[in-house]
Image: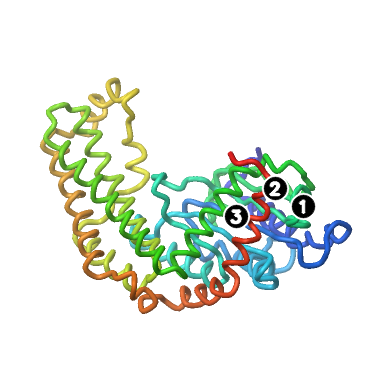
Amino acid sequence: MIIKQPNDDYALRSFLETLESLARNRGFCWNYELWGRGFTILYFSSYIITPQALELPHPKYSQRITILSLINDIVNNDKERAVCIVRTSSPNVFSRNIQCLQQKAIDILTRVNCYVSVYDRSQFINHAKFFIGIHFCDVNNPYRYFITKYYGSTNFTEAGLSKGNYEEFYYRKRRMNSNLQNLSYYLYEIYNIMSRKNNLYTNQKFLRQYYSKHLSELKKLMESIAQAIETTSMIKLFQTYVNSHVLHLQAVSFVSDLPGRQQTSKVLQRVAAEVSPPDPLEVEALTASDKVAGMVVDTMVGELGLKKEDLREVTLKHLKATASLLDLLSEEYKPEDVRKYLNDAEKSFLDYLSEYGRAHLSTLRRILRGRPRM
């Protein structure tokens, strides 16, 4: 690991050089591939992404070398054989200023044809900060590939990557590899994100089924939490209180990940005007599993000055906000009319998916057939 001091920009330099090393990968495959058989994957993850971080130039080299310019060069100079995938947080779980910056960054990444995901039913917060770049020299024989890695504590923000924060990170420039087992988890995760985003935008039947299924699951969780609110156990009541916060955040993320941001943003703004979503980091800090709850909850509740009446009141507030959000979504969002709700960035991305989405998924399936499932 490398420590980034607040007054240096070594993390930014390392990140850009790691990404750039993959941009130069094709020349290193000429000895191994037939033209047209290569495939490049850029996989990014960050809790927060800001527009200014995407435009930060390399501190020593060309001012034209930025994260955004490198993504654009790699993906859009060979649209059928290069993809960008981004995992991050829903803008709507943050306060207004961060929300605006996060949404702008997502729109920028969508415009350069990145598959951006802000919702996963199985996760609470996307805290992972990393970049993995992979170039397969020949997708018909995927056991020869180049890989680059960058990971650490740095969000994709100017203070995280450049001067500002005290951080730690690790990076490794392009390296030849042949062990597909090492990629197993990432490739299936990448495929699932791309498949879901492609189907949400291009397959109306899939969108209807996905929308109905997740809406139903969130409502069932809401009912389960509502039933637990009358418990007399302080431990169970505190966990119910935290669960109501988690549910509120998940509902917000679900709505903001649906295609049709012109409509979903209106729904989210109307409910947020009444009750803002809880702070994700605060919810993370309050979470206590059954294994430790008996030892820590009484102390936590005492230190926070919370009583059972307080816990019930706040739990009901977040349940009401979640119910309002899901009810309003049901009234205002019609999957069959989704194309009417797309903003400009989404319209451009839909055109891209319509032309290249199936080819991307077909290529990934071909790669996955050459390796064991995790």
Q: Position of residue 368 (x, y in %)?
A: 64, 50
Residue 174, which numbered label? none
Check whether the beta carbons of the residues at disc 3 and disc 2 lie within 8 A of each other: no
- Determine the residue positioned at 26% across, 29% down: 300
Q: CA distance from mark 3 to mark 2?
A: 20 Å
Identify the mark nearer the N-term, 2 or 1: 1
Q: Residue flagged by tag 2: what amino acid is it?
A: Gly
Q: Position of residue 297 (x, y in %)?
A: 26, 27
Residue denoted by label 2: 370
Residue 157 visible to the viewer: no
Residue denoted by label 1: 141
Secondary structure, mark 3, is strand
Q: Position of residue 204 (x, y in %)?
A: 40, 69
Q: Residue flagged by tag 3: what amino acid is it?
A: Tyr
For the C terminus, which image quadrant?
top right
Q: CA distance from mark 2 to mark 1?
A: 8 Å
Badge 2: residue crowd in 10 Å (few <14, some 14–19, many ≥20): some
Question: In the image, is 75 to the left or to the right of 144?
Answer: left
Question: In the image, is 175 to the left or to the right of 318?
Answer: right
For the N terminus, which image quadrant?
top right
